[in-house]
Amino acid sequence: KLLQSSKTAILAGMVLAGGITAAMAQTTLTVTHSSPADSHFGLAAAAFKKVAEEKSGGTINVVIQRMDNEREALESVQFGSQECAMGSAGPLGNFVAETRVLDVPFLFDSYDHARGVLDSDVGSELLALFPARGLYGVAWLENGFRNLTTGNKTVNSPEDLRGMKIRTMENQVHMQAWQAAGVLPTPMAFSELPSALQQGTVDGQENPIPVILSNNLDMMQKHLYLTRHVYSPGIFVCNPDFIAGLTEEQKAAVEEGGKAASSANRARVEQDETAGIETLRTRGIEVVEVADRDAYRQAMASANAAFETQFGADLIKRIRDWK
Ligand code: PAF
């Protein structure tokens, strides 16, 4: 409430149909996102701004800001020092532990599969857990299927990865899976990645095509292996007290804006997965279509028993079997 009243301004001079001038309260909603403006998250934020401002009749003013540290962005939303944030769901499990089930490697076969699950009861049931953890989940977004990149070292099979230092997100499930494959996972915030790659602190990293492309990671890496080993969801969250303080019209505008953000985000991921891979090839990174993805699935498989204990074999099966 405090957050909202401090950010509510009086927008004077609104001209009503009859020509009468009225004073209207305008609420500022700052949303941060973790990639450049021309990226899957940047476009999602822009689509949200357009729709939320329009549908709220101009009573919401959306301010878009870039903030690369996704864990800090979620903390700020939870604390109430910023209203909303968009980004990958990488650090989300530190806030809503149950969402970590979505990070299990080779859980989803395709974008249709992942989107279908997030749009189904499974996605809604997970979003329903957010308010008790100080967050309001507006919409699932997506970051994309993650792929491995390396600098000087080449990877012909998962065996070659043994002992390599690979930067991962600060995500326990990803780290457990890489450990199972004999990798030394090196978690760090994305903002620290360029210097870690340049200084050789890590041998490689893994990220979806939209991230590799929009952040020019190909300039720092020589090989891109299309391992698609794990789907990386995205999330759009707001502060629950902020949402509770909105009018019904404003709440509906935020929800509509969330849907627009999700569509824009998915459309851009799709474009990057086709044209974007070609762009990367042209820019000079070696792009390797991994014929034996199953070898990576097998290499990480010894972590599966722990995932079943952690998240429940039934839920994992429900997600895998989604049609
Ligand atoms: O690797 C990450 O940390 C995430 O994929 C990123 C790049 C922050 C998503 O925007």
Image (tube, rainbow, N blue to C red):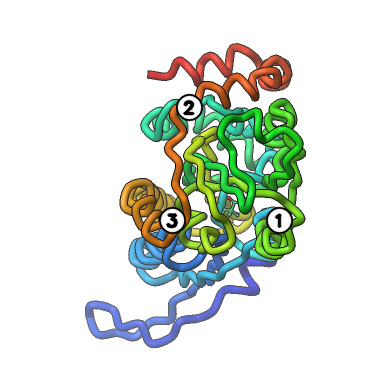
- Residue labelled 1 has its Cβ within 8 Å of some atom of ligand 1: yes
Give coordinates of residue 143: x percent, y percent. 50, 47
- Residue marked by disc 1: 189
Which residue lies under the disc numbered 2?
A: 108
- Tell me the CA gap for discs 3 and 2: 20 Å
Considering the image in quadrants, where does the N terminus appear?
A: bottom right
Q: Earlier in the sequence, mark 3 or mark 2?
A: 3
Which is nearer the N-term, disc 3 or disc 1? 3
Which residue is denoted by mark 3 in the rendering? 40
- In percent of width and height, residue 297 lies at 57, 23
Residues at marks 3 and 1 touching, judged by CB atoms closer than 8 Å? no
Q: Along the line of sight, which residue is nearer the eye, 28 or 284?
A: 284
Work out whether 50 lies above or below 226: below
Crowding at label 1, few (<14), some or many (≥20) Cα neighbours within 10 Å?
some
Q: Where is residue 155 in the image (x, y as percent from the top left)?
A: 59, 38
Tell me residue 167's x, y (percent): 69, 48
